[in-house]
Amino acid sequence: SKKHKVCIVGSGNWGTTIAKVVAENTQQHGDVFEPEVQMWVFEEEYQIPKDSKHASTELASKPQKLTELINTLHENVKYLPDIPLPKNIIANPDLASAVHDATILVFNLPHQFIGRICDQLKGKIVPYARGISCIKGLEVSDKGCQLFSDSIGAKLGIYCGALSGANIATEVAQEKFSETTVAYEPPSMDSQHPTPSGTPGGSPHGSHLDLTQLDGQIQRPTRGSQKQRLMALPAEYPPLHHTNMTKLFHRPYFHVHLINDVAGVSLGGALKNIVALAAGFVDGLGWGDNAKAAVMRVGIVEEVKFGKTFFGDSVRTATFTEESCGVADLITSCSGGRNFRCAKMAVKEGKGIGEIEARELNGQKLQGTSTAYEVHEFLRSEGKEGEFPLFTAVWRILEGEKRPEDVPDMINVEARKA
Ligand code: NAD
Ligand code: 13P
């Protein structure tokens, strides 16, 4: 029988960390997965810095391809320095060859790049592949506001779940204890490989099952449920039910909690990036922990409200209040996340956040600034800016219309009612 082949699409700070987690698990669970993990890398030349522990090697004499550095040193020297990677991770600059025959695609790259990558993936993946999106962001277009798990699923014609949690990448990479939330509602045929007529077995090439009688239509892309024609996994693969999905991500230092609320998981990860900017703004003023806590309180209220208003009743409040992807991610992101740190520095130094991002992050990308603009555009199109005062305040500060000092008044609901 066949084993699942895994490809990580992306290789930044979190992409490389998840590749490490997954590669440890594919080694351990050889009954379900092929050990080798392909990691697609957006190729670039990289000069090993003089203070690196690799500075005395030949590789440091001139800029090298990042894929060659990763495959030789077993370390992503640019985006995850000083973390040894399992040797079964293969860095690959060619997207089509990285995903070739992969039955599990883990999408993990800054959200602004995923649309173009999906366009390039069309026709290159096996039609019965399953996806997991680790991306924290939302896709806003004239169609509305979509989860990346849904938009990836729709563009590629596959089922795609989501992984998100209180997961500062470096801590996970250093194997410091963390929890995460995975939302994966396995298509019903994945547990037992039924044929369209309902008898077990299935064609080795996969078989189409219309789960929804919608014949391939996406019902309303903003709803967080994927209604589409999916192809069953061929029978020779191990089923991709909750147990096997958990085996892919769970480590002794990285505990997975599986739930079904895909929209809640994705929204917590996307929206907390806006809140983390607000927390950075007030911290940058030298205000105390009470100010930051106030921003976080309003932030979680707006996260839940956004979910309930735009993604319907399937979004559970408990996903935000009880799971790692909700309140815990908000706390960690407002303590040590990049959005928080850069927003704080921007206020302290009186500089633009883009300038701080370029100076401090060595090519890593903030997700909160573009998400604040995207969410604002969506709220404006829905006529609901006023109902989300914190999200709107962050946008107004980024636009230069308001100052961080104005945050208390902007989120003071009582004063706004008066
Ligand atoms: P990152 O911030 O390290 O971004 C750098 C990556 O972007 C590199 O791999 C680079 O090659 C790639 N890139 C640059 N230009 C590109 C282009 N034109 N096309 C494609 N790729 C390009 O990325 P990350 O930290 O891996 O973040 C990925 C996702 O994971 C984000 O949505 C982020 O919010 C989320 N996340 C990050 C962390 C974290 O601590 N870093 C934790 C949890 C979730
Ligand atoms: P930043 O992108 O702000 O670093 O947040 C990381 C994160 O998502 C932690 O869970």
Image: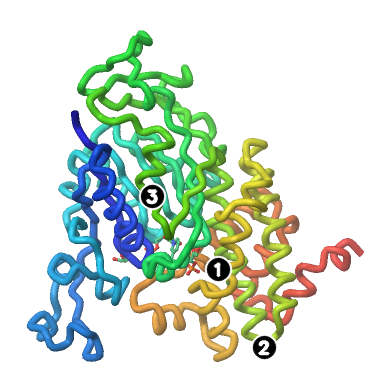
Three-letter residue code for mark 3? Phe
Q: Which residue is nearer to you in this view: 54 or 363?
A: 54
Whichever of callouts 2 and 3 sits on the residue coming sooner in the sequence is 3
Q: Which residue is nearer to you in this view: 222 or 211?
A: 211
Q: Disc 1 on helix, strand or loop? A: helix
Q: Name the residue under label 2.
A: 286
Q: Residue at x 13, y 88 (%)?
A: 56
Q: Name the residue under label 1.
A: 333
Quarter of the image where one finds residue 125: top left
Question: In the rendered structure, are the residues bearing label 2 and label 3 in contact, judged by CB atoms less than 8 Å apart?
Answer: no
> In the drawing, what numbered circle is on residue 349?
none
Q: Which residue is nearer to you in this view: 26 or 149?
A: 26
Q: Residue at x 27, y 75 (%)?
A: 78
**Residue that sits furthest to the left in the current view:** 58
Image coordinates of residue 322 in percent, x first then y, are: 64, 51
Q: In which quarter of the image is ligand 1?
A: bottom left
